[in-house]
Image: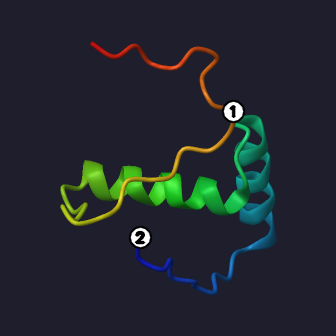
Amino acid sequence: MAERKSVLLRLDPAVHDALTKWANDELRSANAQIEFLLRRALTEAGRMPDKAAKPTRRGRPPKHPPETD
């Protein structure tokens, strides 16, 4: 897996507070929420690169492993 890039992002404090609240409501970190929103915007604009890695799934694994045929 390719190394992830780091960026410095300056936000208005009110925007940061709203983003953090939204992220908490959806059980994400603020960083994960920003990536989620950027990916959604890129996809909707038709600009998501084909070579972009899928986002990592976080949280608990499923209770029952998927069935194999």
Report how many numbered discs are placed on residues in the image: 2
Instruction: Out of 22 and 56, give the one closest to the viewer.
Output: 56
The quarter of the displayed image where residue 39 is located: bottom left
Furthest residue toward front? 69
User: Which amino acid, by three-letter code, is at mark 1?
Assistant: Arg
Q: Position of residue 12 (x, y in %)?
A: 73, 74
Snapshot quadrant of residue 61: top right
Whether 36 is drawn above or below 16: the answer is: above
| Residue 69 left/right relative to 58 | left
Residues under labels 1 and 2: Cα distance?
21 Å
- N-terminal of the two: label 1 or label 2? 2
Q: How is the image coloured?
A: rainbow
Where does residue 46 sit, x and y in percent of width and height? 18, 55
Looking at the image, residue 50 lies above or below residue 69: below
Q: Nearer the viewer, residue 18 or 47?
A: 47
The N terminus is located in which quarter? bottom left
The residue that mark 1 highlights is 60
Q: Assign the C terminus to one quadrant of the image.
A: top left
Label 2: which secondary element:
loop
Residue plotted at (79% across, 47% down): 21
* Residue shown at 71% from the left, 58% from the top: 30
Q: Please give the residue where the numbered disc 2 appears in the rendered image.
A: 1
Classify mark 2: residues with Cα within 10 Å, few (<14), some (14-19) or many (20+). Answer: few
Tell me the crowding category of disc 1: few under 14, some 14 to 19, or many 20 or more residues within 10 angstroms, Cα based. few
Left or right relative to 28: residue 64: left
**The residue under label 2 is which amino acid type?**
Met
Instruction: Locate residue 28, reporting x and y percent.
Output: 70, 46
Q: Nearer the viewer, residue 57 or 30?
A: 57
